[in-house]
Amino acid sequence: MFPFVRLFKDILMARRLPPLANFNDVHISRHICWPWDIDMFGELNNGRTLTLYDLGRLAMAQRGGLVAVLFKKKWALTMAGASVRYRRRITMFERFTMKSRLVCWDDRFMYLEQSMWKTNGECASHVLYRSALLENGRAINPARAAEALGHSPVSPPVPDWIAAWIDAEATRPWPPMQDEIAHPA
């Protein structure tokens, strides 16, 4: 089940923090791995990790003013892709810090990165997301959100590692080939 209580807590906390000065400033939030977050190996479940990343992105959007713009313009956000690296375990009752930021955008998608950090300074996981801004169910140019927030519609430069991921995703077949999945060689 989606952690709505945590979501409301994080949104309320974000509302009390100073607004993010720039469109791509880092939002930092603190979390605890609760018993309902773990898998059978006693560590933060990979699916719950992505759900917790949702909370960080939404709180970041709140602080950046995007939530208000979404409601005002009747826009929505959707995820269009992700690449995740899991490197260190987070175990039950362990505290960790999440960092969330918008990195850049192109004419179709916004690219966001998030990471979870253990109290000893080790990065536990890192994710790159591609998100689309929707109006009436159709993707629109993210530059419109930047303008609505009073920022330049010109994206910061796309880092090489994100550009390489975008290029790799462009070669991935969609939809997946049904016959190859059903009957692998």
Image (cartoon, grey):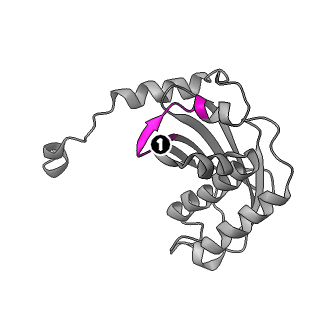
Q: Position of residue 70 (x, y in %)?
A: 60, 48
Which of these two is toward me, 100 or 62? 62
Q: Secondary structure at mark 1?
A: strand
Amino acid type for the residue under numbered disc 1: Glu
Q: Which residue is mark 1?
A: 135
Local packing at callout 1 (Cα closer than 10 Å; few below 14, some 14-19, many 20+) is some
Q: Measuring 65% from the left and 46% from the top, which residue is drawn there?
A: 69
- The reply to whether residue 146 is visible in this rendering is yes
Vertical placement of 184 versus 31: above or below? above
Residue 150's quadrant in the figure? top right
- Residue 47 lies in the magenta stretch: no
Q: Measuring 68% from the left and 51% from the top, which residue is drawn there?
A: 68
**Quadrant where the image shows the C terminus:** top left
Looking at the image, the residue that sits furthest to the bottom is: 35
Q: Position of residue 143 (x, y in %)?
A: 59, 29
Q: Position of residue 77 (x, y in %)?
A: 52, 48
Vertical placement of 132 versus 120: above or below? above
Q: Which residues are magenta?
A: 131-144
Looking at the image, the residue that sits furthest to the front is: 72
